[in-house]
Image (tube, rainbow, N blue to C red):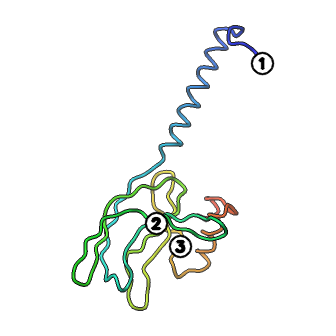
Amino acid sequence: MYSFNDLSIQELEQLKTQIEELIRTKISAESTEFLFEFDATNDPRKGKPYVARLYWNEGKLQREFKELEQTRGKKEVNVSGTYTAKTGDIIEKRTGGSWKNDYRAWYFISETGDQICVADIDNASDKGRVQNYLKGKITAEELLR
């Protein structure tokens, strides 16, 4: 181990530049959270709208539901508000449903904050790929192919 006192001014300047770049990189990595809007209305008997972050824990798929405002009518519920998600998150959105269908899809949050649909709830193959991504078996690039 060496002492900073033993370094030349040029070496200290290089070290300072490297430290500043590392700080900028870490700040950038930590601030990759994006804000999104959601607004959906449906008959709650046929599927209440929601937004949830999907993750893999203890051998199964888990959901972390986003807290959004709910306004109820006679035979419908409106769910709306803003939520945050980070780069690499998988977000599940249910916009509603019917007696026969559930309108849900899974979205990947890109580095630019785009929501890329990676699976419809009815597509088992795509859902399997997303689950492999959440398990760490495939990368984001492989998921998006």
Residue shown at 38% from the left, 87% from the top: 98
Query: Judging from the image, what secondary structure is the residue with disc 2 in?
Result: strand
Q: Residue at x 63, y 74 (%)?
A: 128
- The N terminus appears in which quarter of the rendering? top right
Answer with the quarter of the image where residue 46 lies.
bottom left
Q: CA distance from mark 2 to mark 1?
A: 48 Å
Seen as rendered, the residue at the extreme right is 1
The kind of residue on which mark 3 rests is Ala
Q: Residues within 10 Å of mark 1 (few under 14, many from 20)?
A: few
Whole-percent x and y of residue 44?
34, 81
- Tag in front: 3 or 2: 2
72 above or below 108?
below
Residues under numbered marks 2 and 1 in contact, where contact means CB atoms less than 8 Å apart: no
Percent of width and height locating residue 3: 72, 12
Q: N-terminal of the two: label 2 or label 1?
A: 1
Q: Amino acid at mark 2?
A: Ala
Say if 98 sits above or below 133 in the image: below
Measure the C-alpha gap from mark 1 to mark 3: 52 Å
Viewer-nearest residue: 11 or 42? 42
Q: Which residue is mark 3?
A: 119
Residue 21, position in %: x, y?
Answer: 57, 29
What residue sits right under mark 1 in the picture?
A: 1
Q: Secondary structure at mark 3?
A: strand
Say left or right for 48 vs 112.
left
- Residues 24 and 41: in front is 41
Q: Is residue 86 above or below residue 21?
A: below
